[in-house]
Structures are given as structure tokens and as C-alpha cells.
Image: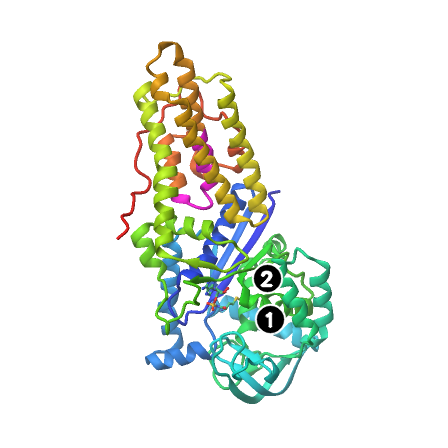
Amino acid sequence: MKKTFYITTPIYYPSAKLHIGHAYCTTIADAVARFKRLAGYEVFFLTGSDEHGQKIQRTAENEGVTPIEYVDKIVESFKELWKRLEISNDDFIRTSEPRHHKVVQEVFRRIRDKGDIYKGEYTGLYCTPCESYWTELQLDENGCCPDCHRPVEKVSEEAYFFKMSKYADAVLKYIEENPEFLEPKSRRNEMINFIKQGLEDLCISRTSFNWGVPVPDDEKHVIYVWFDALTNYLTPIGFLDDKEKFKKFWPADLHLVGKEIVRFHTIIWGCILMALGIELPKKVYGHGWLVIGGDKMSKSKGNVVDPMLLIDEFSADAIRYFLLREINLGQDGNFNRDALITRINADLANDLGNLLHRTLNMIGKFQNEILLAPTEGTELDKSLKDMAIDTAKNYRQLMEDMKISDAVKIVWQFISRTNKYIDETAPWKLAKDETQKQNLSNVLYNLAESLRIVSVLISPFMPTTAKRIHEQLKVSQPFEEIQLEDAEIFGKLEENHEVGKPEQLFPRIEIK
Ligand code: MSP
């Protein structure tokens, strides 16, 4: 049986259109999902939308439409963005869907029947934009939400509570004993400290609005949006209706989330799963934020970057490349238009684009587009082949370790090496010397093979470009069937293989 891999992104709030920071998170998840498929796993990749809660209800009211009318429109724009960005999700979960309501209510019921949910009175502070409860002590120096620094609201109402305090020690122990559960390490330490300060029971229902999943048998309450949202991860893998599928994909292999919601995914989600008697996910990875010139993106600052416009201008693959290459996953990273253009020109148009163009051009010119049988070759040939194999092997390890930016970088080191190999071997000189015929054939073969390997390795990052290289090389194996092992062998192109004509991969961008 195939190994399986279940990966999720957070489900995004449809309170506004998505920006480049959201696209960053989903692009990483997509690269990992594509890598795992390439490595032979059966992957289930989930993303979606987190549609309930007070903030959405208020926004819809302000716009004079019903919540569902409001979210329907925005969620369409999410789906459109993911399509344009070549996101290969296997399902898209909307928390407003009946299939999801059933799961949330069942989870609530099971935990309540067990005695871990009780009714009480909630008096406290609520941050509506973050949909988070806070205590006086947790507020920032201005008495505002410690996460988003906006004012909180005093709330007092009858509510259901989840006995989180009962699971605090168990979750703490779990985090401490399973270092791979929560990465990077800095986030792990943060969570350990957070739990050690003491966990209170969590208020998990509201009565002041109704846009949410009703509490079973007590419909004036709606279930707290985070309790509702977290269970999304159970819905599409058959929690209620497909035992086999559930067994196949749960526990999730990776919840990829932004650093500010690690707390929900490790502590609250951990407690909910423990109460349900279900295994915890294998890994929660808290990535850093994309900032603009060091600043958080926000409407009020007017610095929100629309990924759709960037895709229109530069192509999805160029944006994906930049996001995956420029930012170290665990840390914050800067988004900068000039840096993006520099990368496109230097790495994509120049290094990769020219390598393909020069290679196909020379095979066309010197050998009528035909690759001839190579021989063992020189020391130089051998060093290029060795580097190809080493790159593929190291790439596998780096991707397994979520060191995505490093994986991109070593592929580009290999591309640079291959460009240098052209300069060192000077095929145009070999072509003028009758005695160098075999040598020339070897060089051209090695270049085509190197590009074939590059196309496999970049396919999780830049699926369209990978396919275009594959097509220009006229690799006979169907692109969809390519596996990572195909990059770990040098010499798969057959003798007398005919390659295609070069087509430009990335035009150079003029800097205005
Ligand atoms: N709806 C919740 C998640 C529920 S998951 C069960 C939520 N939604 S969100 O739309 O506000 O954020 C979704 C994700 O986008 C979070 O992981 C957040 O960290 C990420 N990002 C939001 N802005 C970002 C950047 N500027 N940079 C990188 N990621 C960013 O939270």
C-alpha cells in the first residue's frame, strides 16, 4: 500500500480578499504536497474557508447582504486565486457546508456526553477580529488584544465551556515529549510557557449573534468559531461517513499554520482531540509572516499586496519561486517588488531560461535536435553528473526537513554549475573539430539530462515551468507520472532521442 500524507493549510477568513501573506502559506503547503506526491505518497491536501463568527456577520450587515451571500462571493475569489496560483488541493472545505456542520455538532455532542462540556456564565473580554477570548492579565499595555492590538469587548452571557484545564497537563507533556510535534523550536518553547501559566476552561459558545453552527439541542447558542474551524480538518477525510478513509489519513501529517495561530492548533486542538480520544496530528509547523518593508500588511496602512495582480503581471510560477526561495520558513520575510523582479531576471530568465535556450539551440544546430549515445566522458563530465545526483539526494532530505528555501537554493546552485559547464566545455569550439565529435555529443547529452533532472526537482515549486521544460526536452515519460527517483538517475534520456525547439521560459522584466 502507498504511504499517505495529509497536509492542511489554515482555513482563511472570508472577511476580505486574500493577500500575498495568505498566498505564501498556501504556496508552501502546495510545494510540500507536490513534493510528497513526487516522492510516491498518496497525498490529501486540504484548504478552505472559515466562514462563521461575529466579524463576518457584522461585515455582511454593513454591506447590506446576508452572511452567506457575503461569503459566497469572497470564497469564489479564494478558489479563483488558488486556481491561478496552481494550488493542487484535493478538497476545499467551507465551514458553512452541511457536511461540516454535522461534524462540528457531533464533536460537540461527544465531548458534552463525556462530561467535558458544561454550561456556565461567561464574563470576559473578546476580540472580534481575532475571534479570541482574553483575560485582563493577557491584554497589552493599552488594554487591547495582545495579538492584533485592537480594542476588546466586554462580554457577559450564558455559555458552554470546554474543560480545557482537565487536559492542560496531558497536552504539555505531549508537547514536551514529542519534539517533532511542534516546529520550529522557538514556537515550541512559547507554547510550553503559555501552558505553564495555567489553562482556563474555554468558552465555546456565543448567544449574541447567530451566524455559526448551532449547539445541538440548544439552538440559541452558536458554537465558538475556533471550535468550529479546527474540526474542519476532520470533515473531508471521512470522520463521520468513511471509516476507511479516516483511518488512512488521520492523524494529519502536517498542519501548516501562521505563527499567531499555533496556540489554537496545538493547545486548543490538542485538548479537543484528547477529549475525543483521537490521536493528535503528527506535526504543526508555525511559519513566519510576510511583511512589507518590515511592516505588517494592513488595509489601514494601505500596503496590502494583491497576489492576483502579481500573477497577472509576472506569472504564478515567478511568484511561487520568489515566495519559496526568499523566505526562511520559520522566520518573517520581506516582500519587495524590486527583489521579486531581480530574482525573476537573474534566476529565472537568466540562469534557468538561458540554460534551456542555449542547450536546445546547440542540440538543434550541431546535431539536428538528436541526442547521440554518450560515453563515460571526462573528469569534468563526471563532476557534473555527480553533482546532479548529489543535488537530487540532498534536495529530498531538505524537503523532508521542511527546509524549502534551501532546497530551492541547491537546485539553483546546480543550474549555475551547469551554465558554467557550458562555458568550460565550449561546445561551439568542439563542433568545429572533427576529432571532438564524441566529446560534443557527451556535453550536449549531459546538458539535456541535467535539465531533465532540474525539471523534476522544480516541479513542486514551479509546476508550469517544469512541464514546459519537460515538453521542450520531449521527455517520453508522461509528465504526470514522473517520480522523484527519476531525478536520482543520470542517463534516462535515450540515445537518438529527439528534443524540441527552444521557447522562452521567462521574459526579462525592465525595471522602471
Ligand atoms: N480562520 C483562521 C484560521 C483557522 S484554521 C482552523 C485564521 N484565518 S486568517 O485568514 O486570519 O489567517 C489564515 C492564515 O494566514 C494564518 O495562518 C495567518 O498566519 C496567515 N497569514 C495572514 N497574514 C499573513 C502574512 N502577512 N504572512 C504570512 N501569513 C499570513 O486565522
Residue 70 placement, left or right of 7: left
Mark 2 in CB contact with mark 1 (< 8 angstroms): yes
Label 2 residue SS: loop
What residue is drawn where x is 53% and y is 69%? Answer: 229
Which residue is labeled 2 in the image? 239
Which color scheme did the rendering employ for the protein?
rainbow
Residue 369 placement, left or right of 177: left
Q: Which amino acid does label 2 sit on?
A: Phe
- Tell me if mark 1 has few (under 14), some (14-19) or many (20+) residues whose alpha carbon lies within 10 angstroms of its own: some
Asked if residue 357 is among those painted magenta in the image, a careful observer would answer no
Q: Which amino acid does label 1 sit on?
A: Glu
Asked if residue 458 is among those painted magenta in the image, a careful observer would answer yes
- Chain part drawn in magenta: 450-464
* 79 shown above or below 401: below
Which residue is labeled 1 in the image? 106
| Quarter of the image that includes the N terminus | top right
Residue 461 placement, left or right of 161: left
Residue 167 drawn at (x, y percent): 71, 72
Residue 451 drawn at (x, y percent): 43, 32
Residue 339 drawn at (x, y percent): 38, 52
- The tag earlier along the polypeptide, 2 or 1, is 1
Residue 125 drawn at (x, y percent): 55, 84
Tell me the tag on residue 193.
none
Q: How far apart are the two marked residues, 2 and 1, measured between alpha carbons? A: 10 Å
Label 1 residue SS: helix
- Tell me if mark 2 has few (under 14), some (14-19) or many (20+) residues whose alpha carbon lies within 10 angstroms of its own: some
What residue is drawn where x is 50% and y is 40%? Answer: 410
